[in-house]
Image (cartoon, helix red, strand yellow):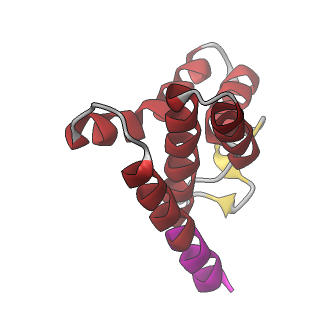
Amino acid sequence: MKQILKLEEVAMFGLSIFLLSQIDLQFSWWVYILLYLAPDIGMVGYSINKSVGAVIYNIFHHKAVAIVIALTGLMLHNDYLLLTGVILFGHASMDRIFGYGLKYFTGFKQTHLGIMK
């Protein structure tokens, strides 16, 4: 079953790459790669405590948040919101491929996908 979930995440990650190729912004591809790592800034919340860290991390890594931002950008014809949503969605998919799920308040390694090794 785990392999099916990973395959599903690979497909969603591929979808995000395809969508990024469709957004017509004047950025180089290296900027996209840099921005793909930007949602990990959410880990800074763990410097305060586990609960704050989990909330901030989950906001940056929740696919529903990403979809709402992307759809808002689409409806408002705002390419930057659309780009942000697509990047958040793709980053969350990429993280889940490697086993990084949404975090519980008990600690960074406690995720909705199980305990990280």
Residue 18 is inside the magenta segment:
no
Decide whether residue 6 is among the magenta residues. Answer: yes
Q: Position of residue 6 (x, y in %)?
A: 56, 75
Can you see residue 103? no
Q: What residue is at 30 percent from the left and 42 percent from the top?
A: 33
Residue 10 visible? The answer is yes
Q: Nearer the viewer, residue 41 or 86?
A: 86
Classify residue 23 as left or right of residue 3.
left
Q: Which of 44 and 89 is in front in this view?
A: 89
What residue lies at 68% left-to-right and 19% top-to-bottom? 49
Q: Position of residue 15 (x, y in %)?
A: 51, 64
What is the chief secondary structure element of the magenta stretch? helix
Q: Position of residue 69 (x, y in %)?
A: 68, 34
Displayed quadrant of residue 70: top right
Say if 47 sits above or below 85 in the image.
above
Q: Quadrant of the N terminus?
A: bottom right
Look at the image and give the residue range highlighted in magenta. Answer: 1-10
Out of 11 and 24, give the one closest to the viewer: 24
Residue in the image at 78% along x and 35% along y: 105
Q: Position of residue 59 (x, y in %)?
A: 69, 32
Q: How many labels does the image show?
A: 0
